[in-house]
Image: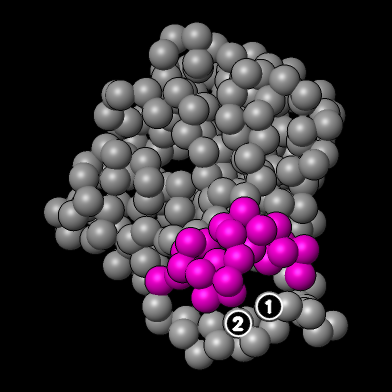
Amino acid sequence: MVGVTIKRVAIVALPGVLPFELGAAWEGFGIDRSDDGIPPYDTSLVSMTPTVRTGAGWTISTPYRLDHAADADLVIIPAYDKPERIGPVLDLLRHTVDRGASVMSLCIGAFALGEAGLLDGRRCTTHWRHAEALAAQFPLADVVPEVLFVCDGPVLTSAGTAAALDLCLHVIRADHGEEIARKVARRMVLPPHRDGGQAQFVDAPIRTSPAQTLAPLLDQLAGELDREHTIDSLSQRSAMSPRTFARRFRDETG
């Protein structure tokens, strides 16, 4: 992230905007929580046209056009049902980065950043279901599919749905410190920081055939989930070298 405290935020509602991610962006930056001692953001909802049809089929009205975002410290692109002809938004995103401000995508909003050329040479992420498509469409981007969010300089990207809130909290934490982020998370009824990444949500097959050599160990580990385990400690228990154990564990469990 750019080392500048964010004060003005512009949330861009593209045609086909998905309501949850739009709401997550507003929940992160548009709610006035000053009664809890939380510094408010000056947040605006902008779009190319006065009304926008959402991905859910209903229409919203927005008070501002794209020019209102010209001096925002952070421009956010929530997920959308990828529309065509968003050239003015791509120009806005490029201009935002060129003048030293930040851009953020939520879920598949990353495709707009890619179309603007802002993912080239940068680490980024999106919903795990769309990570492969993002990497294929923008081969110069370094797509990291297993994380909840990535901050690479002025370009911030989040994974799907709830990860949008994780990234919002991260930005608030960077701006105002851990205590303020904790207060915001408490208002949202969320953990201040969520451990792990998207890998925990990707469908992976559970072992259905017996593991020929590691089954006894795996059964023991099921009763030791509160303990820390390493490749070294487990390889010793299996009478294998760490390298052999790691290879066999991967082969047998996937």
Q: Quadrant of residue 158?
A: top right
- In this picture, is 200 found above or below 121? below
Is residue 46 shown in magenta? Answer: no
Residue underneath mark 1: 214
* Front in this rendered view, residue 201 or 233: 233
Is residue 236 shown in magenta? Answer: yes
Q: Quadrant of residue 250?
A: bottom right
Decide if residue 170 is on the left or right side of residue 106.
left
Q: Quadrant of residue 91?
A: top right
Label 1 crowd (10 A; few <14 / some 14-19 / many >=20): some
Q: What percent of the width, then of the height, locates residue 103?
A: 51, 28
* Circles 1 and 2: CB atoms closer than 8 Å: yes
Q: Secondary structure at mark 1?
A: loop
Residue 149 appears in view = yes
Residue underneath mark 2: 217
Point out the image quarter for the N terminus. top left
Q: Residue at x 60, y 34 (%)?
A: 124
As measured in the structure, the alpha-carbon distance from the residue carrying label 1 to the one carrying label 2 is 5 Å
- Stretch of the chain drawn in magenta: 228-252
Q: What percent of the width, then of the height, locates residue 94?
A: 59, 14
Q: What percent of the width, then of the height, locates residue 127?
A: 68, 50
Say which amino acid is labelled 1.
Answer: Leu
- In this picture, is 41 found above or below 68? below
Q: What percent of the width, then of the height, locates residue 72?
A: 42, 24
* Front in this rendered view, residue 243 or 100: 243
Say which amino acid is labelled 2.
Answer: Leu
How is the structure coloured here? one colour
Q: Residue at x 54, y 51 (%)?
A: 148
Label 2 crowd (10 A; few <14 / some 14-19 / many >=20): few
* Front in this rendered view, residue 203 or 43: 203
Q: Secondary structure at mark 2?
A: helix
Q: Considering the whole magenta stretch, tell me its main secondary structure.
A: helix
